Image (tube, grey):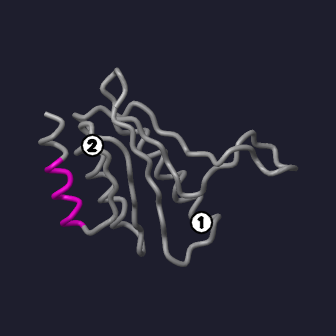
Amino acid sequence: MDEAGLLQLDLTVSIPDSTDEELDDVTRRLATELRDLDVESVKLLTTGEAPEGTKGLDSVAIGAIAISVLPSMLSTLFEHLLSWSLQGRGRTIKFKGWVANQQIEFEGSFDEMQKLVAFLEERTK
């Protein structure tokens, strides 16, 4: 967590049997939805320089989003991610980051996510 109290989370979206183009499209739409929430920042993660012959400065890591959020918005963020994951076939989200001075990584079921949200809410109070 930085001085402003923001939590930093990296999300990885996956959809079984999707093409890179489909996954990129879904990830970009999710990033747009997350920007509409009251989070501090949302950006697509990059893997470094773009391949030679392409116009971009950086190559986007397909399916990867970085989010900065205040602790008070953590539950809202997770609820949105859970809702989003239930909208499509086999959508899953993995995330990792620092919350309450503890590194977290998550990939699991709805019940496990609810337990994690409750735990994190308690830790960030």
Q: As drawn, is 123 to the left or to the right of 51?
A: left
The kind of residue tagged 1 is: Glu
The kind of residue tagged 2 is: Gln
Tell me the residue at 23%/37% (across/down).
Answer: 100
Q: Position of residue 61 (x, y in %)?
A: 61, 53
- Locate the C terminus and report the quarter of the image it occupies: top left
Bounds of the magenta segment: 110-119
The mark closer to the camera, 2 or 1, is: 2
Count all numbered tags in the image, as a single digit: 2
The residue that disc 2 covers is: 102
Which is more N-terminal, label 1 or label 2? 1
Tell me the residue at 42%/75% (across/down).
Answer: 89
Tell me the residue at 44%/52% (across/down).
Answer: 11
Residues 84 and 125: in front is 125
User: Circle 2 — which element?
Assistant: strand
Name which quarter of the figure residue 72 lies in: top left
Q: As drawn, is 21 to the left or to the right of 52?
A: left
Name which quarter of the figure residue 105 lies in: bottom left
- Majority secondary structure of magenta residues: helix
Q: Position of residue 37 (x, y in %)?
A: 35, 39
The residue that disc 1 covers is: 22
Q: Position of residue 75 (x, y in %)?
A: 22, 45
